[in-house]
Image: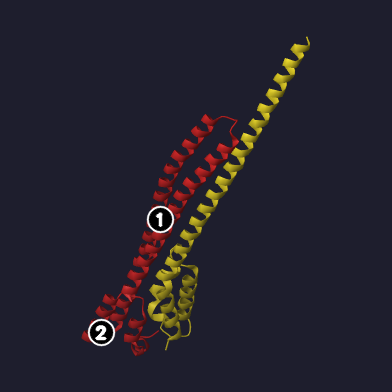
């Protein structure tokens, strides 16, 4: 009877030890898994930043000269000559930055008022 | 604005300050030299500018599309390589069982190294392609000026 009880206690301790080890394994895996996911999130966030930055720069490069030209025309009183250009720019889709559209709208307004001889 | 006033404006200067390509600017200057500056020429100038706007919109769309498609390609390549590394780790961990915790940590360490390498490669590709596409646009625009 005593021997049986001892056996039972040993088995209980063994099961407890195995459970503890299993718990540690789960902890190691979970911790590392979370760390790996976090690192991957950082990488993809960095990619998103790079892509966004380049797209913004492309927009700047493409529309820098048209923006300067609208400004030049407004300063030189040439707004009325390029009414079609301002309309095209101000009604363009999302490819044209808002800043350029807004300048073109101003040029269009300039051309409607007060510039005629 | 009357035609008289339009004629008074400095056509040459406006063409020069415009965002047209060097080729278009030269063509307009030649027309001005040949037939003088008249309403038709200003209208032509206007048309050239609109065509250039359309071209710039298309260029911008192309670059954006190219960039997105390259990133998509690189990401798919990365996912493919990562899947192989993930499966290998999973198999190694399963084979190891629950007793050897030290080796388990080592397996994870080796996994990070491998994943880190393919992530660095992915970032490098994205960075290089982004810069290259940006320079392509800068070169085209600079050439046009």
**Subunit of mark 2?**
B
In the rendered image, the quadrant that contains the N terminus of chain B is bottom left
Which SS class for mark 2?
Answer: helix
Tell me: residue A60, above or below residue A22: below
Q: Quadrant of residue B58?
A: bottom left
Residue B46: x and y in percent read 34, 76
Chain letter, colour yellow in render: A
Residue at 39% of width from left, 56% of height from top? B65
Which of the 4 image quarters holds residue A34? Answer: top right
Label 2 sits on residue: B32
Q: Is residue A97 above or below residue B127?
A: below
Say which label, 2 or 1, has the lower sequence index. Answer: 2
Residue at the disc numbered 1: B125
Residue B100, can we see it?
A: yes
**Mark 1 surroundings: few (<14), some (14-19) or many (≥20) residues within 10 A:** some
Question: Label 2, label 1: how many angstroms apart (C-alpha)?
Answer: 49 Å
- Chain shaded red: B
Quadrant placement of the C terminus of chain B: bottom left
Q: Residue furthest right?
A: A2
Toward the viewer: A81 or A34?
A34
**Secondary structure type for disc 1:** helix
Q: Nearer the viewer, residue B97 or A82?
A: B97
Q: Residue at x 42, y 81 (%)?
A: A79
Query: Percent from the top left, x then y, of residue A71?
Result: 45, 80
């Amino acid at each position: 009877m005593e021997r049986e009880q001892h056996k039972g206690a040993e088995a209980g301790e063994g099961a407890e030890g195995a459970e503890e080890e299993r718990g540690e394994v789960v902890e190691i895996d979970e911790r590392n898994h979370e760390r790996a996911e976090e690192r991957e999130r950082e990488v993809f966030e960095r990619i998103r930043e790079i892509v966004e930055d380049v797209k913004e720069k492309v927009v700047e490069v493409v529309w820098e000269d048209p923006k300067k030209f609208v400004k030049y025309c407004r300063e030189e009183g040439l707004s009325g000559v390029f009414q079609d250009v301002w309309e095209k720019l101000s009604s363009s889709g999302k490819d044209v930055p808002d800043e350029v559209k807004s300048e073109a709208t101003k040029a269009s307004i300039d051309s409607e008022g007060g510039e005629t001889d | 604005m009357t035609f008289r006033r339009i004629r008074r404006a400095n056509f040459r200067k406006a063409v020069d300050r415009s965002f047209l390509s060097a080729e278009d600017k030269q063509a307009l200057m030649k027309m001005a030299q040949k037939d003088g500056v008249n309403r038709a020429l200003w209208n032509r100038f206007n048309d050239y500018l609109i065509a250039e706007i359309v071209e710039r919109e298309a260029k911008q769309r192309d670059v954006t599309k190219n960039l997105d498609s390259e990133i998509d390609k690189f990401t798919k390549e990365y996912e493919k390589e990562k899947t192989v590394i993930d499966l290998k780790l999973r198999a190694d961990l399963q084979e190891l069982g629950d007793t050897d915790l030290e080796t388990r940590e080592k397996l994870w360490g080796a996994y990070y190294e491998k994943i880190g390498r393919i992530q660095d490669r992915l970032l490098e590709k994205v960075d290089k392609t982004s810069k290259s596409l940006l320079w392509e646009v800068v070169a085209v625009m600079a050439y046009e000026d």
